[in-house]
């Protein structure tokens, strides 16, 4: 099927203007700044309470430069979304990572092979901790924490890396559930 | 280490009475009804904004008998938490499933082997859909949806099953991140 | 299907009183002490020679406090049966482990996540050795033995841990072959 | 290390003549017929009660042409031992399969790739059932049984295939536990 | 490490002008047409005989529009390189696929999730056949061939898809062996 | 199907005498020395350009005693072909390894369990490096190289081990694609 004929979500969408007022007002500046409406808002808008809680959780973890920089937070997202092979999150957050890190190749490298790509030591420690919790969380334990601490990550940073990994474990699965189509704009942003 | 010496969470806890007022008021009736404070509240209370968003997302998906019954929602939680081998969620939601389903053996069966345990056809379709998204979400697709629809699940039910699976993909990883200790009471509730 | 309508074994059963005399006499005190007839005896009773050899092998490994305590032997059984997701063995031997260890939560913890659950150092060494041989025996080797010896396990204890893991590799598969239903009593014994 | 310097078993051996009388008398004709003492007897002889029970279980399943032929029983052993990459069982039972099937290439084919090797339809059904229970027994279920029955296998044959798979799940792990060295003679027997 | 400081290959490189004459003459027009020297030539140039044979094998399979179009041949490369998480091949052949298919998003979709991405039926059949041989070739068999034929693929097309998958099984591993750095130009070509 | 009725390749064969003259002249001495025509030549002969390039790549890596001995090169082939469960390569190169190493049991040991078989330290380092690149090349990295260097392998030897692993990643898949039947003679050569 050609891209233009593909549905945004398997379950249909709700446009921003049809959302409850608090969500309209909250999303308007994001849409204005981005230049388009990220499709996750349209898809999750079918259940406003889910969208609202998702945004709250997202903002609590991603809108901060305290400890982890915003670029490092996006690095966690791209690494775990790459490990999970989630198209929407790799493409959308790959764009955000390019913008935030100002390194146009980093997102493709991390998403293609988060285990083996070449990173600076702090980045590698961040990604390794995320990967340890991402696909086989039942094996996560003290060994992973010790390596993170050894690399200089604080407990608050470890909490954030783990929590972002957890949040995108959910997001990746929502995108797969919806067969969520990335906006075309994301593919080239920040390259 | 003996149970009584184990920390509730690797990152420390915040007691309910030390949470912001809205969270105190929201959790008080749950604690009162349950008879004890589920440890997830204490552990996540370290970050009130995360706890608040988590509760909102949880309630949007779990507090409903529309389409899926509450017992069926807990069935999804126990199946995916069992697949992920998450101790806290298996023990805590196993207790809730026993209570909601009034079937004292169901939770142990589903958590031990969600793939192979014997279930009624509708239950099996629910669990199979959840498992398809749980561990290898990159393989989720039309085949899984067709099987769910063939078994009579509606699109709203499919949305809910997938969204609950996604939410507990996050919860399981938070519990592993925290090394979250289940309250002793959960082990025997509803048996 | 409701529990009471489920067959004990996919291949039918033979009651104790219909077994050859030596097996009747051997099993009678176990049934009397337990208060009910564990379903494995009924299912395997269809082939008395197999049942007899299985009991002999079981008793040679499990009825001893020499080196490994009886509780530690059951710990191996529950860890490997949990790793293999075998409902019958998890439920039946989980009950025995609760009784022998006098720790009512240990069996649920170990069966749910034998890799990550919190254990005392000697218990962890026992479980790690069992897990090394349980699912990918082709990778078992000197590294696993060295870790076991480093933790203080003797060669006789290592032999026993490995042999019990091997025996329950067989038992788990027999239970799955039979779709063996755990006796309802096992679910609550020792809690 | 050169072959001649390698120990037969990591835990030492007991020669046949040092075993209890019943085992000596039982093994003597096998050794005489084979022309050498299979090393599994020497290694397991360290615990006569285990050796005795193992032989009893083995003979109850392998010494019969009722339903499954003896060659078909060895086919199950070689397929599951190949899937488990167990050197001793592949080499020793590969030799027996060559002798019993009178097909000198069959054992190497089945051990190297039990999933994909070319077999006659009844052989393929036997091997597929064994493989379904061999590595991921938690996924074994009605689908596997239906395929076996569709191929004409009786319930007694299914019982035997599953039970032999279970027995060698144990044997493979014992051989790995012992680092059991195959007798040199097995490599060329029946070629 | 910053990109500009990274070595092209872990084993050093040989520039085109230092290659034997036949290779210089063969590669010059490719370099001229591409506008830069793809790093695989530099890395493999350390062993001219390997480079020569690799180019011969590559050209025998990739420089043809007979049966499979050139875009379809690149689709196989990107799908299998994505499945293998090979950075160099995903980035370099992703660029070629964008150019040959004139679909700027196709390569990112296929490389990120070759199993689940949305494709036209003939593309899906091509990718499914490639994936069947890519990661677990021991499971490849008649079922995969039947699906390919059912989708209309001829035996010559099946041969080509399988052979390209095999060639890039090698290429991916060479790139990983060399830690081969993709040329920066490939990241944006054809977007 | 009986062996004698099996096709050599799923896609038909071309006999040596029907190949282009350069290939006839090149293969004649190999066939003469071997005493029979290895089936890979017949199967790949359907595409002479592929056969020619394959032979060139093969000879560039395998016909040398510089650094790695020829027996060590075959050891890499048998280890990776065993890991990939490729019947043709295990049987054909198992024979060559027996001849080159003069150790009649080595090939069966390595092919059956390349991870766990007992080897001399240099052999183990060679096999470990090959296995690190064989099945999950995305995890290959500095740790594997450091272990190889620690064992005394030079960079040229590491290049060769990795390149042979890559070549046979291709060969194994071609054999599976063709359902390539090993010549009967290979099964007993060198025993």
Image (cartoon, coloured by chain):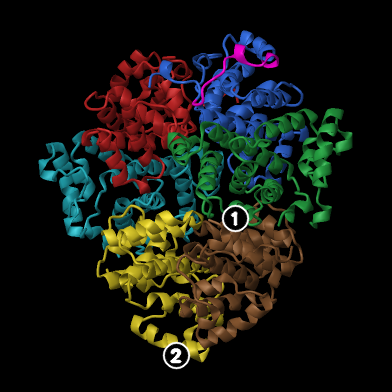
Chain colours: A green, B blue, C red, D cyan, E brown, F yellow
Q: Is residue E17 left or right of residue A55?
A: left
Res C48 visible: no
Q: Chain of mark 1?
A: A
Residue E172: % across, % down: 53, 64
Q: Is residue B168 left or right of residue B109?
A: right
Residue E57 against residue E183 in the figure, above or below: below
Res C158 visible: yes
The answer as to whether the residues below labels 2 and 1 share one chain is no
Q: Which residue is mark 2?
A: F25
Is residue E138 one of those drawn in magenta? no
Task: Tell me what residue is drawn at x 51 percent, y 29 percent.
Answer: B112
Residue situated in front as seen by the camera: D36 or F18 = F18
- What residue span does the magenta drawing correspond to? B10-23
Q: Which residue is mark 1?
A: A109
Task: Tell me what residue is drawn at x 56 percent, y 53 percent.
Answer: A113
> In the rendered image, which quarter contains the C terminus of chain E?
bottom right
Residue A106: % across, % down: 62, 54
Residue C62: % across, % down: 29, 27
Residue B53 against residue F133 in the figure, above or below: above
Residue E46 against residue B12 in the figure, above or below: below
Task: Tell me what residue is drawn at x 56 percent, y 50 percent.
Answer: A114
Residue situated in front as seen by the camera: F44 or D26 = F44
């Amino acid at each position: 099927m050609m891209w233009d004929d593909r549905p945004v979500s398997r379950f249909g969408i709700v446009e921003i203007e049809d959302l409850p007022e608090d969500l309209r007002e909250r999303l308007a500046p994001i849409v204005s700044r981005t230049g388009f409406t990220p499709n996750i808002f349209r898809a999750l808008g079918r259940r406003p309470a889910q969208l609202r809680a998702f945004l709250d959780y997202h903002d609590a973890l991603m809108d901060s430069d305290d400890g982890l920089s915003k670029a490092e937070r996006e690095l966690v997202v791209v690494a775990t979304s790459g490990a999970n092979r989630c198209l929407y999150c790799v493409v959308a957050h790959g764009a955000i990572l390019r913008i935030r890190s100002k390194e146009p190749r980093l997102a493709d490298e991390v998403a293609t092979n988060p285990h083996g790509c070449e990173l600076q030591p702090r980045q590698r420690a961040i990604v390794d901790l995320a990967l340890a919790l991402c696909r086989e969380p039942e094996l996560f334990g003290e060994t992973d924490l010790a390596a993170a601490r050894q690399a200089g990550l604080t407990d608050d940073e470890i909490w954030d890396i783990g929590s972002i990994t957890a949040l995108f474990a959910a997001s990746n699965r929502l995108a797969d559930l919806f067969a969520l189509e990335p906006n075309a704009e994301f593919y080239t942003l920040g390259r």
